[in-house]
Amino acid sequence: MAGGYTHQSINRVGAMAVAEGLINTSENDTLVGIDHTKREVIEILSQVDHIFADADGTLVSDGAEIFTTDKIKLISQLTSLGVGITIVTGKPFAEVVPLRQTLPADIPISFICEKGAYSVHFGTTGAWREFILSSAAQERSVAELREQFVVFGGALIKKYGSDKLGFGWGGSGEHKSVISIDIFAGQPPQNYLSLRGKERDAHKLQDTGLIKRVEHDIKQWVSDQQPDWRIVHIGNANTEISPGSIGKSEAIVESAEFGAARKVLILGDSSNDRGMFALRGTFPGKVLTGLVLHRKASLPLVDNADFITFGMANSNPILNAIVYARGR
């Protein structure tokens, strides 16, 4: 083991079988390099000068509001070695502030929020938003559709029964450019917005058949209301609706950091990151992809991954490898 990780080389033909075999293992320090020897991995990762990383499940546990001590150390080491970091998340502004506050004030880091709608910059005088793919007018359209969903959601609850189905806003409930909807098993508790992670999950709908029927109904409703808008079923009984212009991958490409970078690493953990991983094919030679694998639903991303690590939010092996490669 070198630099806080253990390397394992595999070929792409056998990558899926290896991933399926390791997905249920506990968090470990294994870094799987696909079609790259250990020496090649070190050489490639030494060139990475910017990381675009998803938050939940990739850098922090689902619903977590702070970075762990080991992540703070790695982020500090990476930035000191000249590696820029942008966190690309579905979280709204209100939910990234606590994450930023757990980092030392002198660490430069950016956030692309609500799937690319806007970026958040933190300076010595405070924090401010800057639109990327959204606008004030588009946020008003989102607010209008959100109000309309309250009525439509009520109709669905009447259809399936209030003892079986209920809705609430995802995360902190403060999204402005996307509509995040949690699907509950009956009416959610009044304090559900203060619940995070497993505490909220305990109240969510578990009936996969009913979830699929409800998601189908929502998809049809969105198609009738806003045909060009996107609907993404995140999993974990959560659905997100957004204008068609908004997307993580589009925001990455639009960012100044992407344009200035020589080699980029994209980190993700779920189907919601599929568009980001597709940039590997759009920008061959510039974009590398790392999959933090901890759920079976993410296995299709293996086909577009250069590296794999295993365990919830366990991106440490690949981050350690970059620190080692850049610091030699």
Image (spheres, helix red, strand yellow):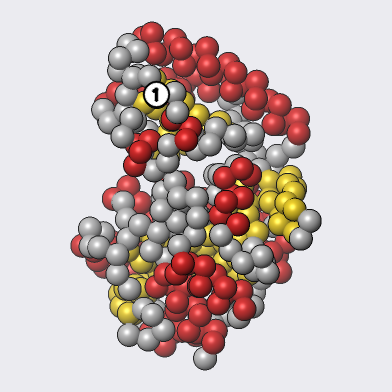
Residue 305 in sight in this render: no
Please name whichever residue, 285 or 61, is drawn nearer the observer in this view of the structure: 61
x then y, percent, for residue 247:
59, 45
- Identify residue for label 1: 188
Picture residue at 79% right of the left edge, 56% below the top: 125
At horizontal 50% and vertical 38% (from top left) the residue drawn is: 171
Going by the image, does 3 lie left or right of 14?
A: right
Note whether 230 is above or below 96 in the view shown: above
Q: Residue furthest right?
A: 125
Which residue is painted at 31% across and 34% down in the image? 202
Q: Amino acid at mark 1?
A: Pro
Residue 239 against residue 290 in the figure, above or below: above
Residue 188 screen position, x and y as percent = 39, 24
Q: Quadrant of the N terminus?
A: bottom left
Quarter of the view holding residue 301: bottom left
Horizontally, is 242 left or right of 300 in the view?
right
Return the x and y of residue 298 as percentages of the image width and height.
35, 51
Q: Quadrant of residue 47?
A: bottom right
Could one spot residue 36 in this view of the protein? Answer: yes
Q: Is residue 313 or residue 202 the one in the foreground? A: 202
Residue found farthest to the bottom: 328
The residue closer to the viewer here, 173 or 190, is 190
Q: Secondary structure at mark 1?
A: loop
Above or below, 316 relative to 202: below
Query: Could you say which quadrant of the image residue 237 lies in?
Result: top left
Give the residue at x 53% y 18%.
149
Label 1 environment density (alpha carbons within 10 Å; few <14, some 14–19, many ≥20): some
Q: Position of residue 211 (x, y in %)?
A: 33, 27
